[in-house]
Image: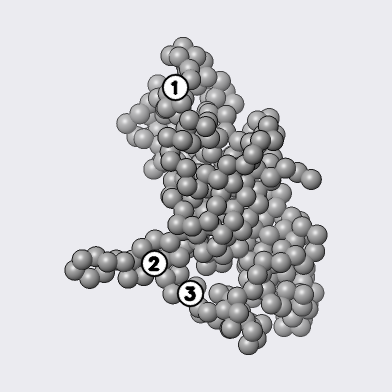
Amino acid sequence: MTPTLLELRGLKKHYPIRGGVLRHTVSAVRALDGIDLDIQRGECLGLVGESGCGKTTTGKAIVRLHAPTAGSITYHPADGGAGVDIARLPFATLKKLGLRGKLQMVFQDPTTSLNPRMLVKHIIAEPLRAQGRLGGKAIEARVLELLDRVGLTGDHLLRYPHEFSGGQRQRIAVARAIATDPAFIVLDEPTSALDVSVQAQILNLLKRLQQTLRLTYLFVTHHLLVIKYISDRTAVMYLGQIVEVCPTRDLFAHPRHPYTHALLSAIPIPDVEHKPHRIVLAGDVPDPASPPAGCRFHPRCPFAVDICRRKGPSLEAVAPEHLAACHRKQETADLVAQRFGRGPAEALG
């Protein structure tokens, strides 16, 4: 079996809602509400779901940009040593153990994630200086090496971010992320702000870097076809919880959760003769400050029954390496076929 790099158990992140004259906490937005997820070393795990479901918050919690409210994040070192729960460790301890540089993140919009007042050579060198392990000339050589890895040259060192195209800026952001030799990188929709042709270039760059540097990715996106291209496994999120996890090929061939069926049916088909069979969900995503009882998806699920309204389903195995959180997971494919008059694969286009 592939060794596990990160184990998330009961991970929660609640943002307080304050009110009254004294600004007491009156409620909380449950951005993450009890996530259990394993990320295997060397894989690309795709994370998909609607806006506001908690995808980006998951990535930020793992790299400790946001402190988790509860739960654990266990990091397993490559040497096979004991796992370390990084959810509660102070930043100074993370740095002392060498873990701060092992977890990095590439943000969605490089225009806002790169300091407009810094030259490229200083942007890429910043994490190296923060680590304090290299001298001045060694840092310069490392920056040139990183630029070459991402397809840029030394001619770009003395330029500011606004002098680059969107794709080039994202390459700079990737160079900064791999500067500290990380083991794990959160890719938060790294191609959504780019042209389609440039998206392909960045995706190929990320795949090449993963192979040569033996990286592990958490790839956050709305674009399911990008997930199909780059990810080994895919996790589907809904309202702060994981509802399905499986190898990507199985997710497209044999989805088990009604929400996954709806997401896949929304993929546009580039064929004017094709008549799409969409699963249109009723209503809007519930308020994460007051989620519904039972299964959180039941107010919009076309196949909900009484137990769905009373009891929240647990994430359970439905096939080898395939987990789903649905009371009707064993019959979902048949229900979709009955409703839309086609088998699961045909109904999803």
The three-letter amino acid code for the residue at tag 3 is: Pro
Q: Are marks 2 and 1 in contact (CB under 8 Å)?
A: no
Of residue 348 and residue 100, the one placed in the foreground of this image is 100
Q: Determine crowd level at label 1: few under 14, some 14-19, many 20+ residues with C-alpha closer than 10 A.
A: few
At 34% from the left and 34% from the top, the residue drawn is 116
Picture disc at residue 291? 3
Q: Position of residue 59 (x, y in %)?
A: 52, 50
The three-letter amino acid code for the residue at tag 2 is: Ala
C-alpha separation, residue under disc 3 versus residue under disc 1 = 45 Å
> Is the residue 191 above or below the residue 179 in the image?
below
Q: Residue furthest top?
A: 137
Q: Are marks 3 and 1 in contact (CB under 8 Å)?
A: no
The three-letter amino acid code for the residue at tag 1 is: Gly
Q: Secondary structure at mark 3?
A: loop
Q: Secondary structure at mark 1?
A: loop
At 72% from the left and 83% from the top, the residue drawn is 339
C-alpha separation, residue under disc 2 versus residue under disc 1 = 39 Å
Q: Earlier in the sequence, mark 2 or mark 1?
A: 2
Q: Position of residue 83 (x, y in %)?
A: 62, 42
Q: Quadrant of the C terminus?
A: bottom right
At 43% from the left and 14% from the top, the residue drawn is 136
Of residue 210 and residue 274, the one placed in the foreground of this image is 210
Q: Is residue 189 left or right of residue 123?
A: right
At 55% from the left and 52% from the top, the residue drawn is 72
Picture disc at residue 46? none
Circle 2 residue? 28
